[in-house]
Amino acid sequence: MTMDDEISKDPTIAINENGLEQIEALKAQLSAKDAQHNALKASQNDTLLRLKTAELKALGLAQGLIDTDALKLIDLSTVEPEQYEATINDLKVQKPYLFQKPVHSSHARPAPPSSPPEPRHALDMSPQEYSEARARFLRR
């Protein structure tokens, strides 16, 4: 007596063809959902990596980072959001040549005072300067 014969005789264990089709359909749905989950997880990881890069870039530029390509020196998979500032400070200590003194708008130099251009009188010009100035004036 084979295993199939035992299953077919016992009504509690009997599996009909419809049940097998349902199991196969459920397996297909499960594999599709698994693939969808993996795609969403990969997308989430990519988005998190971009977010970390953007936040570190903003912090680095605020602290005087010269080139944002220097952020490639940081292993972003190990950095948590609470550690961003400490990470940039560590990079600044380890590789100070990547940073310059930060320039803040509150420390900007004042603009030079404006003064209107002084007109030149025709009597103060040479004949050549006068003819050039007259030609410019007439072209307007």
Image: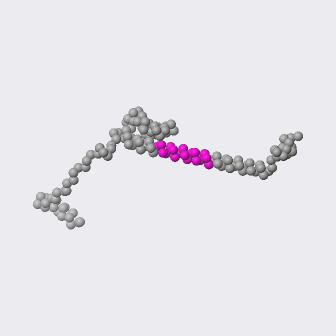
* Relative side of 117 to 68, left or right: left
Residue stretch in magenta = 36-53
Near-viewer residue (106 or 88): 106
Q: Residue at 42% of width from left, 34% of height from top?
A: 90
Magenta: main secondary structure equals: helix
Near-viewer residue (65 or 139): 65
Vertical comparison of 75 with 109: above or below: above
- Quadrant housing residue 132: bottom left
Looking at the rendering, in which quadrant would you find the C terminus?
Answer: bottom left
Q: Residue at 47% of width from left, 40% of height from top?
A: 81
Q: Position of residue 34 (x, y in %)?
A: 64, 46
Q: Residue at 41% of width from left, 33% of height from top?
A: 94
Looking at the rendering, in which quadrant would you find the N terminus?
Answer: top right
Q: Position of residue 55 (x, y in %)?
A: 44, 44
Q: Residue furthest front?
A: 12
Q: Residue at 78% of width from left, 52% of height from top?
A: 18
In this orientation, does residue 4 appear?
A: no
* Relative side of 117 to 78, left or right: left
